[in-house]
Image: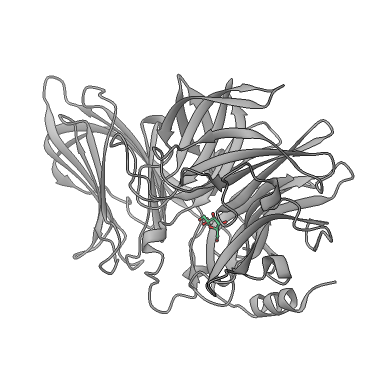
């Protein structure tokens, strides 16, 4: 039985008519209204499922539902009706983030955080967060009668009942496990591990890792998986102070590599690195594809700029491109999913273009494109700066500057259509390769994602530059050589979004 809140949300989104041309081509946006974190990224009955934090009624964060879509190739998403609405006592203030899995009898289980308001003795209100379960057939879901299934009673001493969310659910043998983010007695984040025989009775096992006030305050949205012989824990801290300059202050995402004792379920941290060094990236989740790839998707947005909604736009919030992950020599590598190559419509390549001053290349322009370039010094000559300008007209451009002597790469979107208030520049250190640099740049109407040196680093940012600004230029101080491959990305708009 559908609740009246879910029926209302489904009726509302069914009449949404945002034309595809007003959206990105490949980057998922909400059916209508607001989108934040990816939820329940999984494979079920032969299709990829992706849910998302969703307020259909406004382009601002609000009562969180779960939006829902499916795909065969991770790029073209078919919209399904909203899966969850805040319609029950324990989740009236929101169905927060969570994950999905398949039950042994072939149903789909969603585990999420139910939020309600709690009245304190002094008359003020506080949020109470508990973990809840809903079971369904891939379209409709029933919330468990025994919800909430993990509450403050299952917390270790000192754990916060209001910062307790975002369960990552998985199954091993006959046991269900859930890794849940919590704020502990020292005021900072930790990831707690629970186990259950039946999704209803949960027991706290241990703490997998914790911030200890060094790696941010509250931690959100854990993911945990094995990859290339390593165990990877992803967490999204709030209020990170950027301990060693490689990270972003505030909301950030950490990739923690560790050793995993599978029997004891113990995680021992070895190293921490950033995942994305651009301006818009948070709350990632991963899925294991049927052919064994670990693919990540994230909310391509910074919380700090999430109130800056372009006038007249009826959606807000988009996902990153799905990215294939690898770990090599302790380093996380990310590249766009290979499925993207099927959407390249026209292409051209140039070898050893001699760059001097500023130049444009014939046919190299556009706002939906896949551009790969390899830059290197001319024999015996150094260059001091390389500048790539994208989404460009007379007044605007999104800019990448590479300064080989400093091994510095800067993404600058200060002329990319934003009102004042959004962070607009980020400089990062890149590997010293004697002036060589490889970039793969994906543009999709309202965003740019830059994959550096085979995916060793990624910089993602949203853009609001008008679509007519589609120029691209290359500029060098000194002289350099460049190999370039340019593809326009295209889709058949008759296929469902
Ligand atoms: C992360 C987050 C989650 C929470 C959700 C609420 O962006 O704050 O911790 O579940 O968003 O929408």
Q: Is residue 461 visible?
A: yes
Does 135 sit above or below residue 486? below
Q: Quadrant of residue 347?
A: top left
Q: Residue at x 33, y 51 (%)?
A: 363
What scheme was used to colour the molecule?
Answer: one colour
Q: Quadrant of the N terminus?
A: bottom right
Q: Nearer the viewer, residue 474 or 302?
A: 302
Residue 234 point in image, percent of width and height: 52, 38
In the displayed structure, 170 sits above or below 258; it is below
Furthest toward the front, the residue is: 121
Residue toward you, 316 or 39: 39
Name the residue rendered at 28%, 69% in the picture. 419
The part of the image, by quadrant, that contains residue 94 is bottom right
List x then y, in percent, for residue 143: 79, 61
Q: Which quarter is ligand 1 in?
A: bottom right
Residue 18 locus on image (x, y percent): 55, 75
In the picture, measured across the screen, residue 145 lies left or right of residue 18, that is: right
Q: Nearer the viewer, residue 144 or 472?
A: 144
Q: What percent of the width, then of the height, locates residue 122? A: 53, 72
Lateral position of residue 265 relative to residue 390, left or right? right
Instruction: Name the residue located 29 percent from the left edge and 66 percent from the top edge.
Output: 417
The image quarter in which residue 276 lies: top left
Name the side, left or right, on which 460 lies relative to 122. left
Residue 82 at least partly seen? no
């Amino acid at each position: 039985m559908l609740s009246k809140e879910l029926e209302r949300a489904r009726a509302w989104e069914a009449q949404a008519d945002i034309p595809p041309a007003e959206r990105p081509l490949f980057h998922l946006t909400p059916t209508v209204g607001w989108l934040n974190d990816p939820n329940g990224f999984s494979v079920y009955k032969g299709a990829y499922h992706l849910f998302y934090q969703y307020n259909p009624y406004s382009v601002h964060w609000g009562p969180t539902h779960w939006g829902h879509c499916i795909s065969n190739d991770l790029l073209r998403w078919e919209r399904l009706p909203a899966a969850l609405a805040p319609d029950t006592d324990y989740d009236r203030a929101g169905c927060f983030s969570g994950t999905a899995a398949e039950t042994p009898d072939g149903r789909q289980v969603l585990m999420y955080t139910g939020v309600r308001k709690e009245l304190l003795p002094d008359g003020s209100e506080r949020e109470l967060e508990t973990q809840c379960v809903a079971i369904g057939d891939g379209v409709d879901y029933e919330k468990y009668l025994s919800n909430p299934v993990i509450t403050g009673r299952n917390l270790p001493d000192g754990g916060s009942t209001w910062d307790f969310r975002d369960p990552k659910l998985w199954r091993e043998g006959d046991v269900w496990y859930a890794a849940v983010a919590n704020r502990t007695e020292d005021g900072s984040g930790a990831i707690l591990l629970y186990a259950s025989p039946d999704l209803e009775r949960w027991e706290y096992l241990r703490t997998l890792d914790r911030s200890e006030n060094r790696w941010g305050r509250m931690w959100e949205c854990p993911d945990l998986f094995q990859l290339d012989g390593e165990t990877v824990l992803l967490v999204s801290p709030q209020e990170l102070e950027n301990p060693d300059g490689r990270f972003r202050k505030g909301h950030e995402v950490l990739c923690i590599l560790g050793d995993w004792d599978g029997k004891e379920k113990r995680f021992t941290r070895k190293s921490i690195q950033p995942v994305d060094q651009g301006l818009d990236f948070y709350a990632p989740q991963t899925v294991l594809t049927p052919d064994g790839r670990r693919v990540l998707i994230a909310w391509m947005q910074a919380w700090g700029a999430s109130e800056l909604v372009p006038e007249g736009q009826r959606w807000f919030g988009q996902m990153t491109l799905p990215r294939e992950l690898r770990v090599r020599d302790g380093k996380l590598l990310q590249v766009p999913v290979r499925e993207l190559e099927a959407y390249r419509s026209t292409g051209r390549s140039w070898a050893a273009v001699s760059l001097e001053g500023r130049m444009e290349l014939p046919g190299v322009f556009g706002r939906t494109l896949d551009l790969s370039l390899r830059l290197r010094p001319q024999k015996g000559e150094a260059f001091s700066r390389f500048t790539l300008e994208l989404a460009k007209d007379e007044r605007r451009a999104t800019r990448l500057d590479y300064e080989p002597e400093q091994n510095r790469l800067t993404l600058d979107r200060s002329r990319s259509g934003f009102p004042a208030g959004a962070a607009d520049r980020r400089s990062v250190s890149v590997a010293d390769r004697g002036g060589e640099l490889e970039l793969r740049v994906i543009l999709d109407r309202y965003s740019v994602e830059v994959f550096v040196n085979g995916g060793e680093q990624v910089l993602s940012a949203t853009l609001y530059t008008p679509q007519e600004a589609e120029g691209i230029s290359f500029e060098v101080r000194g002289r350099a050589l460049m190999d370039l491959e340019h593809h326009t990305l295209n889709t058949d708009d008759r296929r469902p979004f």
